[in-house]
Image (spheres, rainbow, N blue to C red):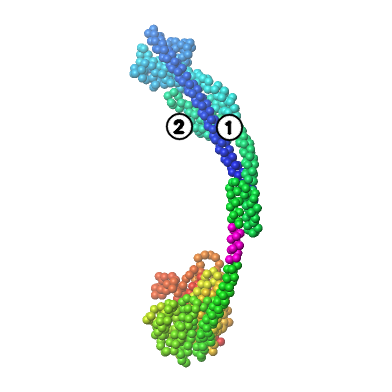
Amino acid sequence: MSFRARLILLVTGLIVLSVMTITGVLTWHARQELLHAAEREGHQIAVLLGRSVGLASTVPIEIEGLVEDHMKVGALLAAHLLQAAEGKGETVEAIARRFDDVVARSVAEEFWVMEADGRTYIHDSAVTDPALDPGLNSAAHPDDFLPLFAGEVDAVDHRHQKTGADKRLFKYTGVAALDAPRVVQVGVEVSYLTDLAQRVGVQHIIDELLEEDDIDAVWVFDQDMAGIAASHGPNARPSDRELTELAAVIETQRAVSFLTDVALTVIVPISSHEGAAIGATIVRLSTRHLNTTLRDALVLSAGTFALVVLFGVVMAAVTGRWLSNPINVVAVAARAVEDKTFRPELLDAVAGRTDEFGQLAATFGSMAREVLDREEILAGLVRERTHELADKNQQLEAAQARIAEELRITQELQISILPTQTLETETVRVFGTMTPAREVGGDFYDFVRLDEDRIAIIIGDVSGKGVPAAFFMAIARTILRRLALSGEGPSALVERANNELCEVNPLELFVTVFFGIYDARDGSLVYANAGHSPPCRVHRDRSVSFIERTGGMALGVMENVSYRQASVTLESGESAFLYTDGVTEAFNASGEAFGDDRMVELLGEKTGAAVDVARHVLDAVERFSQGVEQSDDITMLCLDRKAASMPGPALVRASLRLSIANQLSELQRLTAEIGGFTSSHALSTKEAFHLGMCLEEVVSNVINHGYDDDKPHSIDVHLDLVGDNLNVLVRDDGRPYDPLTDTPPPDLETDVANRRVGGLGVHLVKTLMREVRYRRLDGSNVLSMTMHVRQTT
């Protein structure tokens, strides 16, 4: 997209965004104003209706007060009538008939004359209300008129209430009789008070309000949420939410309003002149007018928006053209500078302008001319420097070739001073090998025949790399070889070698050394270890153990250091395997080290001459680190004590390789395979039984206790018949567990009933096997067992 197009798009987008924001804000503000106006209108209507209802509630009260005054006069006249009638000696029945005549000729509905005990003395015959049973001689609400007997008041007005089954509204007024302790009561039906309150004009106001389009419905309720007045039509009933809010308004005396999808509802409480809650008004306002007004505003805003956008696009196009033309001219000139075809005339279209673009064109023209001049100068300098660098590179390549040749010669010399032939006698075989890394290193080995029976073996590793380490290695080998012929023991010899190396060590290097003297007469190996990796001892059954360290310091670190010597005797058919850390610290592409465990496993697998063992280990290391550059020398030295009963190395005469699943049902297959092996190779019945018992104990323990999950696993069982030894190996990938150390010994002294469970199976295996060893190798448990066998014919 061109700059002009981006500029037009940016300006148009800003205008559109601004107009949309302003339109949205104005529309929202207009909507809020309309809502507030509608809410104020609804509140005013509700207040007006509330005041009308309040007025309607006071009119009946005032009229009821006038009725009370007239009823008091009627009650006093009735009291005088009673006094006069009794004074003439009239009977109770005659007086009652006079009261009947008064009831028939006036608004009074009932007359009562009540004794002090609440019983009726006289009443008119019109009293037929079932709620006031005449048979009980009980006056109307006698308890409310007791103060008249005590002379506390002159008259008692009983507030109107609904009585009887027909729920007519009655009011009673009583005064004290003039001639005896009695009370004269007058009862009047005042149902017209309710009718009067409903006819004071509230419904008429509601009907007139509904003629407006903005008002959907109006309801007026009393404090008991009974309807006083309401609109008619499709919206004749309030919604559930309106009724819920109505109850809250009557209780809290606070107006509320809320908006729904179709209406705005305003609920205002109604209070009496004394401030008491007497009801509430609901006004539901339609949002049609609000929506129409908003729609008109949106149409107007949309039209304005379209005009503004159109104007913005036109202005953006004009502005973009005005801004982009000079930039395009400068861009063309810049490409011309890049192509070395720049001419000042390219900027004429802009150079004449007096604004910033004109200044930019003038500055760019000056800069372009200066750049071209400097580029020409720089090109000449580059050509000169290129020739110089070419000469230097040729000299450097020649120097590198000389250095590489010298290093190759140094490496060849380093290898040439090491023995390359196998030293072999009737009883011993010694072989050494070193595979150098790409860089010259400091590994070395040596073996020197001191006399007919003794051989000195040496292996060492100098710290550091390169030519210094190679020279220090040559010095160390020369000193050790010379001192080996002096006849001293290993410890004294190593001490002297350390002091001599400290004197000729300006670079402060050091070398780890294992020095041993092997005596073929008894197979003893007397040695001293100066910080070197401990050699391995490979037994006849191909089990491997490490030769004990003597705790010495590396040579060349400090003068006058004492070294301890020790000895180990190699049995017939056993070997000593010496190595440097280039074997165990070889890494693969994942950064994993070869490690001691892999080396030990390889030594246990391979049988044969020393050279075969060394090459077997070397091949395994090279396969392991395939694809990774060798970072250290790989050096090994093997010493074999030949077996007296064979001219060559002991051979495996028979083997069995079996893999079973971790299921108890596999024990049957294991037993069958073991039985076939022992029968095929003439093992005695006792030996076969012992072998089967031990393997069943070991494998069943692995199946029952070796795994933390229910997944399928594989258990490997190897049998190798070597001479009169049967080597047995059981390998599993269960959790780490050494049965030789982690299993407590069995308690054989306690009686069977109280004996601790466990340990007896391991004890049985250790008893029946000549040798039992455990090691953890590559995440697996490896249990090796050796059993002496005598084959039957």
Q: For the residues marked 2 and 1, what is the alpha-carbon distance in whole angstroms?
A: 30 Å
220 vs 185, left or right, is: right
Secondary-structure class at tag 2 = helix
Instruction: Check residue 374 for magenta coloring.
Output: yes
568 vs 292, left or right, is: left
* Mark 2, residue position: 252
Front residue of 495 and 291:
495
Q: Is residue 545 above or below residue 120?
A: below
- Label 1: few (<14), some (14–19) or many (≥20) C-alpha neighbours in 10 Å: some
Instruction: Check residue 223 for magenta coloring.
Output: no
Q: Residue furthest bottom?
A: 452
Under mark 2, the amino acid is Thr
509 vs 409, left or right, is: left
Q: Is residue 415 visible?
A: no
The quadrant in which residue 680 appears is bottom right
Residue for point 59% across, 27% down: 213
- Label 2: few (<14), some (14–19) or many (≥20) C-alpha neighbours in 10 Å: few
Residue 287 place in picture, x, y as percent: 58, 32
Residue for point 48% across, 31% down: 255
Residue for point 60% across, 53% down: 364
Q: Which residues are magenta?
A: 370-381
User: Residue 363's mark?
Assistant: none
Secondary-structure class at tag 1 = helix
* Mark 1, residue position: 290
Residue 691 place in picture, x, y as percent: 51, 78
Q: Is residue 710 visible?
A: yes
Front residue of 52 and 618:
618
Q: Are marks 2 and 1 in contact (CB under 8 Å)?
A: no
